[in-house]
Image (cartoon, helix red, strand yellow):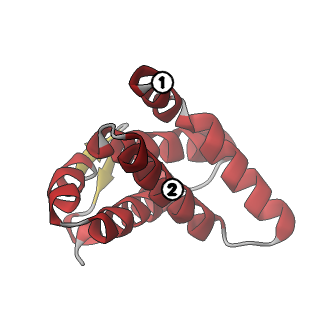
Amino acid sequence: MRNSVLGTVRGTGEVFDGALVGASRIGVNALQAVSVAAAAAVRGAARAGTDTALAARSAVEGAIWGAQDLGVDPIDVAIAAEAGAIRAAAELGSAALRAVRPAVSGVIGGVPIPPEASAP
């Protein structure tokens, strides 16, 4: 189970492509859709007992990958995914937050995440 969940998390680029495309088609804010999808990835990893930090980082990477495919600003998308991942980790508790926050900061997928982006 753990390997299948991690494999799914690592393949999140397609999920974020879908979130961005779907959001634009129905008039939903794409960044909000990305944030919600990243939060869901972290919550899902926690429910499955897998690595929430890996899920969070993979969600940000997937969002960046999807943004680049669709011509959306990868920094804005990365910040939205980071915010969703951190929000979910905070809901899960301090241990999850301590694991997730450093996993989604710095340079991810060649995109620098501004330090203030992960501030509460």
Which of the image's four quarters has the C terminus? bottom left
CA separation in Å, label 2 and label 1:
16 Å
Q: Secondary structure at mark 2?
A: helix
Does residue 95 lie above or below 71 as drawn? below
Residue for badge 2: 40
Depth order, front residue of 104/9 = 9
Does residue 14 lie above or below 70 as drawn? above
Please report whichever mark, 2 or 1, sits nearer to the chain's N-terminal start. Answer: 1
Q: Position of residue 2 (x, y in %)?
A: 40, 26
Residue type, mark 1 in image: Gly
Q: Secondary structure at mark 1?
A: helix
Left/right placement of residue 109 relative to residue 76 reads left
Depth order, front residue of 88/84 = 88
Q: Residue furthest right?
A: 25
Residue type, mark 2 in image: Ala
Q: Residue at x 38, y 42 (%)?
A: 55
Q: Residue at x 28, y 69 (%)?
A: 90
Q: Residue at x 51, y 63 (%)?
A: 35
Residue for badge 1: 7
Q: How many marks?
A: 2
Q: Position of residue 24 (x, y in %)?
A: 78, 62
Q: Position of residue 91 (x, y in %)?
A: 33, 70
